[in-house]
Image (spheres, helix red, strand yellow):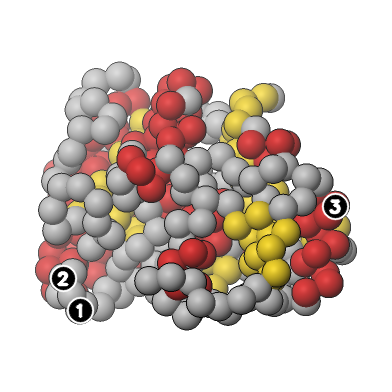
Amino acid sequence: MAIVHEFEYFKPERIEDVIKLLSEYKGKARLLAGGTDLVVRIKDELESPAAVIDIKGIEELKKLEFREGKLHIGALVTFTDLIDSDIVKKQFPLFWESSKTIASPGIRNRATLAGNICSGVPSLDSGPALLVYEADIIVRGAEGERVIPALNWFLGPRRTALKEEEFVREIVFSLPAKNHGGSYIKLGRYKGEDLAQVGLGILALEGNEYRLAFCAVGPVPSRAKKIEALLNGKPLTDSLLETAKRLVSEEISPITDVRATKEYRVHVAKIMLERGIRAAVERIDGNGPAYGERLI
């Protein structure tokens, strides 16, 4: 389907020009980075912007840097950039693992992390990684810069804390202070490009500390606080895992749709929880399944 909607097109080379255009169009402009979500929505007439601001010419938004214990991901960094990064793979392996599950290679070559989180869809594969690493989203607008914790970013289906006249400049991941291992498990209907039926990210840190986050089983990606409270500070045992699995139905609120029933999602989420925690704990010491290996 061709795009039949008319709009003004801009390709600024400076962040200041982006801010000016967003202010001029007062919520009626949309930013174009990878375009994998926006272009489809314009074609399907779900979006009808007065202006499209193409930011691909702004060099500083392409930076992917690790400095002073923090990973800085510019708004134009693609998922392929993240997957190809040795720093991401070594220091943030859960994030690397989740990035490899997103869509297809062709989409990952264009799609950006910033665009992905701005879509705010419940099945967002990058959501659990942002939440368990407790990333910060740096946004800019006419009123200056804001730092929004990932824990406060997702407000509802396709709703985020980003204001209409702001844009994401970068996403910052802090390296955990302790040795850690992680896992991201995505249940899909088939191997290849598919939206998650259930997604679960787990970060296990030395000292029996755990962070868990689900996606695709509620209105927003979210941390599993009850399960975390149960697990934290306790050695991992079979009985503890069984208790944690019983809490899954209290942490998630899946729906029945074309991809799965809610009952199936709850059932499989419990299996994913056990496999994911065991893998994450083993990976702390460099053991267990290799990152990127399917666990379900």
Q: Quadrant of the N terminus?
A: bottom left
Image location of residue 259, percent across then percent down: 18, 69
Mark 3 residue element: helix
* Residue at 24% over, 21% down: 287
- The first of marks 1 and 3 along the sequence is 3
Mark 1, Cα crowd under 10 Å, few <14 / some 14-19 / many 20+, is few
* Residue at 21% over, 77% down: 257
Question: Do the residues bearing badges 2 and 1 touch, measured as CB atoms within 8 Å?
Answer: yes
Residue at numbered disc 3: 16
In this view, 145 is above or below 207: below
In this view, 224 is above or below 24: above
Residue in the foreground of this view, choosing between 33 and 158: 33
- The first of marks 3 and 2 along the sequence is 3
Residue 86 seen by the camera: yes
Residue at numbered disc 1: 256
Q: Amino acid at mark 3?
A: Glu
In this view, 129 is above or below 251: above
* Residue at 65% over, 73% down: 7
Residue in the foreground of this view, choosing between 4 and 35: 4
Residue at numbered disc 2: 260
Give the side of residue 41 with respect to residue 153, left or right: left
Q: CA distance from mark 1 to mark 3?
A: 45 Å
Q: Amino acid at mark 1?
A: Thr
